[in-house]
Image (cartoon, rainbow, N blue to C red):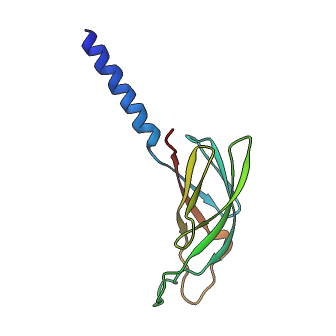
Amino acid sequence: MKILIATIAVALTFAMSVAAQTPEFLTVKHTKQGFAKKSKLKIKFLEVVEDSRCPTGAQCIWAGNAKIKVLIDNGTTKQEFVMNTTDGPKGDSFSGWAIYLEELTPYPKSGSATDPKKYNAKFKIVRLSR
């Protein structure tokens, strides 16, 4: 009986530690704010600073880069960050969490400018180890 209880306790401890490292994903529309439930972080997608990614249908030498500005809030502290798709920092750490720009959509199209209202940023949030 003691072995069974010890085995269950070890299994639950392991399951909780694995769940703590499972990334959380959050998609936020341009100028809107999203709430990440596990990390309890609010992420506001402030603006697209630049989008020089190679448009769909074009042949480019360089893949290009998109750069966005976000505001992250943990309930007591707020901080602005700049994140990139290719060049420069893709993310940063804040309040014990690593936040990365996973994807920025839509991808530019050859011959037309992207309406800023249509941008969506997908973030990956991972708990930093203690």
Q: Residue at x 55, y 64 (%)?
A: 90
Among all residues in the image, which is located at the extreme top? Answer: 1
Tell me residue 56's x, y (percent).
48, 83
Instruction: Give the camera-side residue of 23 and 80.
Output: 80
Q: Residue at x 46, y 38 (%)?
A: 20
Question: Quadrant location of the N terminus?
Answer: top left
Among all residues in the image, which is located at the extreme front? Answer: 130
On screen, 5 above or below 60?
above
Hey, which quadrant is residue 66 in on the image? bottom right
On screen, 56 above or below 101?
below
Q: Residue at x 31, y 17 (%)?
A: 6
Tell me residue 74's x, y (percent).
68, 43
Tell me residue 5's x, y (percent).
31, 14
- Total of numbered circles in the picture? 0
Tell me residue 112's x, y (percent).
60, 86
> In the image, is 84 to the left or to the right of 49?
left
On screen, 7 above or below 16?
above
Q: Residue at x 64, y 68 (%)?
A: 68
Hey, which quadrant is residue 30 in on the image? bottom right
